[in-house]
Image: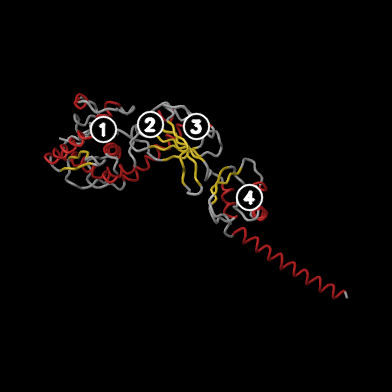
Amino acid sequence: MWRSIASNALTLFVVLLVAMAGLLAWGREEFAGPGPLDQSICFRVERGASLSAVSRALEEQGAVSDARIFRIGADYSGKADGLKFGSYLVTPGQSMAQILDSLTAGGQSTCGREVNYRISVASAEMVLRELDPATNRYVEVVAFDPATAAAPAEYLDVAEADDIRWRVTLAEGVTSWQVVEALKRAEFLTGELAEVPPEGTLAPDSYEVERGADRAGLLALMAERQAATLAELWATRADGLPYETPEEALIMASIVEKETGVAEERRQVAGVFVNRLRMGMRLQTDPTVIYGVTRGEGVLGRGLRQSELRRETPWNTYVIDGLPPTPIANPGRLSIEAALNPDTTDYLYFVADGTGGHAFARTLEEHNENVARWRAIERERGEEAATGVQD
């Protein structure tokens, strides 16, 4: 009898072991396998939220199939106490393990709202955007220029939230003065700015920052990135360029930046200026004259006067020989590349062609014909524009 009882007990124990092993295998498969979500969601972990509350919320929103398995998996992997406050993008089919990794990785939120402070030549615009989980694209909620408008309610309602992502974006061609003035108006930054960095030394780029970041520290990062870009591209420069230092190349790049917004034209424009320097011709480019008038402090907002074209300033390339003494803006990487590896052509002139680009010419006669066509377009549009590079 005891033998029978022992045998039955052993059999039951084996059955329980097999059942437990099967249950564990099923649990591991559920934890590591594809999740039930069929459409992306933006999942928020509240500050101080417990693992139990987060797992229930994930199950209620359809991101996990079983809250208990998610909790057990978090305990088993040692991440039960590692949840990080923020908003996270959960995509279709993500496993519990992948979701747990996202929620415990830390760093900036991967979903939710973002404020991008865009500093351009004409303005500085604060743009509040929100990620649409379905398309994984940001949708603009509200935008305003802090220099000309009060912050709208939509911005004020979320500006203090801890999970907002902050970004500062510099457009190509902004001046250092414009950058400094815009950063002073960015209320989410801190610290004083005593000086304007040398022209051309700030890298146009997008910078992710935290609320309360130091303005001077951000400027230092911009300068560091521009210096690294210039050093990298200087090492790959073409032979025989008519400038001897990286600083001279940066001056040329800034002129190219202000002369054309068409990426495909940058090397051609740089080639025209390189040809002129080699031949001892003056650059005769309007953006340098404008810089001599404004010193980079704001936008001229009108056409150049003949008196300004004749006025002698260190930057007036209708009057001076060679390059001006400093850059006239902060050039982007593509313009620096163009200055250091210009197209090899025999073009000496260019003028706007009415399409946003330019018509290039080898001779003054060809250039004058292009100018005449552009003037006709101007008359049709009732506009006044610059004549580009001329003799």
Q: Which of marks 2 and 4 is nearer the N terminus?
A: 4
Are the two marked residues, 4 and 1, in contact with CB atoms closer than 8 angstroms? no
Distance Cα–Cα, label 4 vs label 1: 60 Å
Q: In which quarter of the image is the N terminus?
A: bottom right
Taking the image as shown, residue 234 lies to the left or right of residue 8, namely left
Q: Which residue, given by chain and number where applicable, does mark 4 sit on?
A: 60
* Dot in front, 4 or 1: 4
Label 2 neighbour load within 10 Å: few <14, some 14-19, many 20+:
some
Distance Cα–Cα, label 1 vs label 3: 33 Å
Which residue is nearer to you in this view: 262 or 104? 262
Distance Cα–Cα, label 2 vs label 4: 45 Å
Distance Cα–Cα, label 3 vs label 4: 35 Å
Q: Which amino acid does label 2 sit on?
A: Ser
The dot on residue 188 is: 3
Q: Which amino acid does label 3 sit on?
A: Phe
Q: What residue type is labelled 4?
A: Glu
Label 1 neighbour load within 10 Å: few <14, some 14-19, many 20+:
many
Q: Quadrant of the C terminus?
A: top left
Taking the image as shown, residue 229 lies to the left or right of residue 89, namely left
The dot on residue 175 is: none
Above or below — where is 21 with respect to 346? below
Q: Which residue, given by chain and number where applicable, does mark 1 sit on?
A: 287
* Dot in front, 2 or 3: 2
Looking at the rendering, which quadrant does residue 263 occupy?
Answer: top left
Q: What residue type is labelled 1?
A: Pro
The dot on residue 123 is: 2
Distance Cα–Cα, label 2 vs label 3: 18 Å
Are the two marked residues, 2 and 3, in contact with CB atoms closer than 8 angstroms? no
Q: Which of marks 1 and 3 is nearer the N terminus?
A: 3
